[in-house]
Amino acid sequence: FTHKQFGTLRLGQGDTSTNGISEVDLSGTGVAGYSSVGDVAGGFAFVNSATGARSTATIGDAANNLDGLDIADRLRYDSPSVNGFSLSTSLLSGGAVDATLNYSGEISGVTLEAAAGWYNGSSNPTNDDSFEDGFSGSVSALTPSGFSLTLAAGTKSAATQGRDDPKFYYAKLGYQAKLNTLGASAFAVDFGRYEDAAQNGDTLDTVGLQAVQEIEGTGSSVYIAYRYHTLDRTGTDFDEIHSVMTGAYVAF
């Protein structure tokens, strides 16, 4: 139900208010890489440097961008936008709740988007891991010259006794320009640190490079991305993991 003055009310399965709060990205390279680094090669397991054995530690388990309550059966309300700001909150089946503050606009010619949210998943029956409150957010700025800066961070409080609170930090520097007749070209380099996601004492560091070429008028683009991962775990040394992904994105 949508009303211009009073906002939008949604009932049913869909995005919660906090889904996407860690993933605001104006770099133009989101199809090739963003703060959820485990979406690419997430099932790849780290190899023990001493024994050569494949471990149970994977990129996906060790890299969590704490992106809210995901998709669920919920009652969600979104306020109208006022000077670029809007509020959103949702109540999930089972009692989990969240709330988000969003911004979209321009400041001195710089396009700016941001989202920050709080969520409590202690009663969420679909939650993958046990936690109480979480706070996450991201902000991305795109200048008229084509340069962009994206930052994201978050943490959540572990409900299990003795479990450290997972947290992450992410930064991306990008550049966009029309370098050929095909359409806009976008390039970016990013860095992410993900701590205590799989177990206490874990630190996954990753550096990535992305390039995306838009094919104007077709709704499609082609991309290539490289990413370097290291996992520091108490008592164990792991080999690095390199991943390369290329492909095409077609919107229709």
Image (cartoon, rainbow, N blue to C red):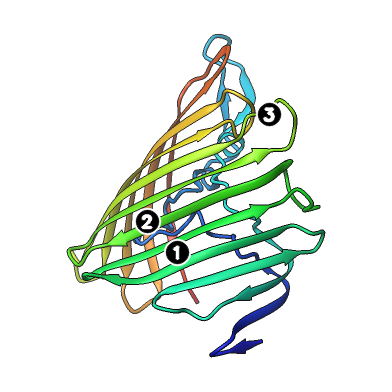
Q: From the image, tell me which residue sits under label 3.
A: 163
**Residue 177 image point, x, y percent:** 21, 64
User: Of callouts 3 and 1, which one flags the residue occurring earlier in the amino acid sequence?
Assistant: 3
Q: CA distance from mark 2 to mark 1?
A: 8 Å
User: Of callouts 2 and 1, which one flags the residue occurring earlier in the amino acid sequence?
Assistant: 2
**Residue 132 image point, x, y percent:** 70, 44
* Residue neighbourhood size for the residue with mark 1, other residues' Cα within 10 Å, grouped as few (<14), some (14–19), many (≥20): some
Q: Which mark is residue 17?
A: none
* Residue 184 higher or lower than 39, as above or below: below
Give the camera-side residue of 17 and 175.
Answer: 17
* Residue 237 higher or lower than 210, as above or below: above
Pointer 2 with pointer 1, Cβ within 8 A? yes
Q: Secondary structure at mark 2?
A: strand
Give the camera-side residue of 118 and 218.
Answer: 118
* Residue neighbourhood size for the residue with mark 3, other residues' Cα within 10 Å, grouped as few (<14), some (14–19), many (≥20): some
Give the camera-side residue of 53 and 69.
Answer: 69
Residue drawn at (44%, 51%) of the image: 34
* Residue 250 higher or lower than 65, as above or below: below
Q: From the image, tell me which residue sits under label 1.
A: 249
Q: Quadrant of the N terminus?
A: bottom right
Residue drawn at (59%, 36%) of the image: 166
